[in-house]
Image (tube, grey):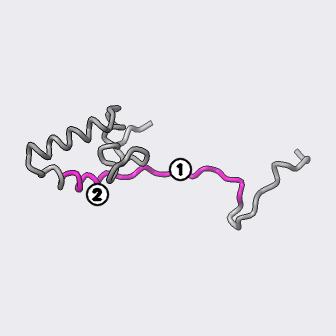
Amino acid sequence: MDKRLTLSQNDKMIGGVCGGIGEYFKVDPTVIRILFILLCFVFIGSPIPIYIIFWIIIPSKKHTKTSTKRHTEGFYDFSEFDDKK
């Protein structure tokens, strides 16, 4: 399994950057957010464009399609209830 840095879909406040970094490094995303805020105070807001750049270049997670029991027309597939197995 490849370990990739992606935007978080579950733990996001604005864009999912800090949540994705937290998931990648297995750190609580709140710690990453606090460090980001501290960096904004120390460097007088210059990390904000870096966050926006990360938001643009870090890919979001690919959603895997769950298998449903519907056909594309919207009708349910009742073949699982057939006695002819």
Magenta stretch, residue numbers? 50-70
Considering the image in quadrants, where does the C terminus appear? top right
Image spot of residue 78 (x, y percent): 81, 54
Please name the residue that numbered disc 2 is placed on: 56
Please name the amino acid that badge 1 sits on. Answer: Thr
**Badge 1: few (under 14), some or many (20 or more) residues near its Cα, within 10 Å?**
few
Residue at image location 19% in from the left, 43% down from the top: 37
Image spot of residue 13 (x, y percent): 34, 49
Please name the residue that numbered disc 1 is placed on: 64
Which element type, helix, strand or loop, lies under badge 1?
A: loop
Q: Residue furthest bottom?
A: 73
Which element type, helix, strand or loop, lies under badge 2?
A: helix
Can residue 20 be found in the magenta stretch? Answer: no
Can residue 60 be found in the magenta stretch? Answer: yes
Sequence order check, earlier mark of 1 and 2:
2
Image spot of residue 49 (x, y percent): 17, 55
Considering the image in quadrants, where does the N terminus appear? top left
Q: Nearer the viewer, residue 83 or 19?
A: 19
What mark, if any, has residue 41 been given in the picture?
Answer: none
* Spatial CA span between label 1 and label 2: 22 Å
Answer with left or right where residue 15 lies relative to residue 46.
Answer: right
Residue at image location 30% in from the left, 44% down from the top: 18
